[in-house]
Amino acid sequence: MTIAIPHTPRTGRRKESVARVKLMPGTGNHRINDRVPLEYLKRESLVHAAFQALSVTSAAGKYDVVARVRGGGLTGQAGAVRQALARALAREDEALRGLLGRAGLLTRDPRMKERKKYGQPGARKRFQFSKR
């Protein structure tokens, strides 16, 4: 007797965004925050980036993806979905782990916004220098 284990969400992060992705066997229906991915992410390039793991593993029509994303902007959210989806696929089928790793989809992108420093208008920009 086998017990059906519910698919626990995988987490992905990028910049200030956090994504939780559920991967379920299905026909290829994708939802991000209860909306169609193109409607939510607004740009085709972001949709391709978010679902790159499915195209790399040739699993595009095999799974339904339900993603919950919060924080950050659209680019960060697409990156967070990308990592969470790759982690979910790697957990679903351990043989895909090497393929996803070589594509760089399992690695968290460490780049963050640099903090603003006091006495300056921005992180790196300085106020105009005047000799006199």
Image (cartoon, grey):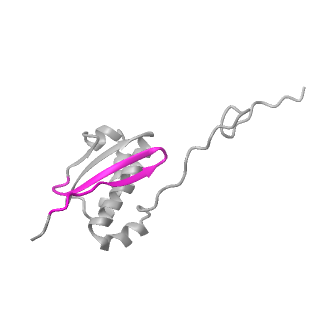
Where in the figure is residue 69, as x and y percent of width and height?
A: 35, 43
- Front-most of residues 130 and 89: 89
Question: Which quadrant holds the C terminus?
Answer: top right
Query: From where the camera sits, is residue 5 visible?
Result: yes
Where in the figure is residue 70, as x and y percent of width and height?
A: 38, 41
Asked if residue 87 lies in the magenta stretch, the reply is no
Q: Which residues are magenta?
A: 4-28
Q: Quadrant of residue 123?
A: top right
Q: Residue placed at 33% from the left, 64% from the top?
A: 56
Asked if residue 20 lies in the magenta stretch, the reply is yes
Number of numbered tags placed on the structure image: 0
Against 73, is 29 above or below? below
Where in the figure is residue 93, as x and y percent of width and height?
A: 27, 69
Q: Quadrant of residue 63?
A: bottom left
Query: From where the camera sits, is residue 57 visible?
Result: no
Q: Residue placed at 74% from the left, 32% from the top?
A: 119
- Front-most of residues 80 and 45: 80
Against 115, is 100 above or below? below
Where in the figure is residue 59, as x and y percent of width and height?
A: 25, 63
Q: Is residue 5 left or right of residue 81?
A: left
Q: Residue placed at 41% from the left, 41% from the top?
A: 74
Query: Residue at the top extreme?
Result: 132
Question: Which quadrant holds the N terminus?
Answer: bottom left
Q: Residue placed at 69% from the left, 37% from the top?
A: 117
